Image (tube, rainbow, N blue to C red):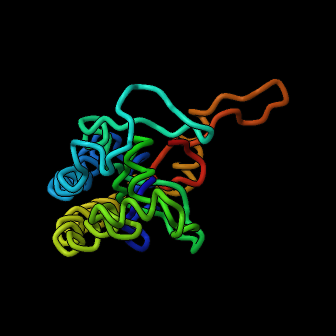
Amino acid sequence: MSAFISVHGLAETLKELHYLDRSLYTQIAKDIKGSADKLVQDARNEFPVKPPIGNWHITPERRGASRFPYWDGSKVRSRITAKVGGRKNRQGEFPILRIVQRDAGGTLMDMAGTASPSIPLVKALNTAGFERPSRVMWRKINEGYPDVFANINLAVNKVEKLVTSRLAGGAVSQRALQSERASRQSRNDKGQFGSKFNGPSGDSGTE
């Protein structure tokens, strides 16, 4: 499960930077990710250490017919992280920054009831004081968006100036970039490229 922040055109800019200057790309990605440090910590603090409802089991296995995940508060919190880039969404947008919850129990708590708000689990969560989904992730994203966006804008301006300067100066052309990309890829026995760019745009990479 993830919530994301999108900035128009930045994914393409980062993709070019990935080939123009790999070390600079790494630093910019680190800056963007770091802009969400406080947001990640705030989201972690919203998830309870103890199970959100009384009958949620805490032993490390899945139980019941639906293989219900167990609750470990430390893992639920620590598995919330920030990631740069991602796959294109239904609106055709590429996220620049994602806040990701990778714990099964945390994801279930946060998103339970999206389709069936009347099921017992959702009623129990609502009674315990956790409002309907998203109970943590989207709410914290919305609250922290202005500060994070301001920090991302600083990184965006740095990226755009550097890439524009390099391209305008003729240091690297699009044709040269394409040639460099091709030279890095391996070919199969039919002469076709056998690998994909695993970068920030998300349309051809993997998480």
**Residue 180 vs residue 113, the one in the foreground:** 113
Left-right relation of 202 to 84: right
Tally of marks: 0
* Residue 103 x %, y %: 40, 41
Left-right relation of 129 to 91: left
Residue at image position (56%, 33%) is 184
**Residue 80 vs residue 48, the one in the foreground:** 48
Vertical relation: 75 (above or below) 43: above
Residue at image position (20%, 75%) is 146
**Residue 117 vs residue 4, the one in the foreground:** 117
**Residue 39 visible from this viewpoint:** yes
Left-right relation of 142 to 98: left
* Residue 175 x %, y %: 57, 54
* Residue 66 x %, y %: 60, 42
* Residue 49 x %, y %: 21, 42
Residue at image position (22%, 61%) is 155
Vertical relation: 198 (above or below) 158: above
**Residue 102 vs residue 159, the one in the foreground:** 102
**Residue 11 sits in quarter:** bottom left
Q: Residue furthest right?
A: 190
**Residue 34 visible from this viewpoint:** no
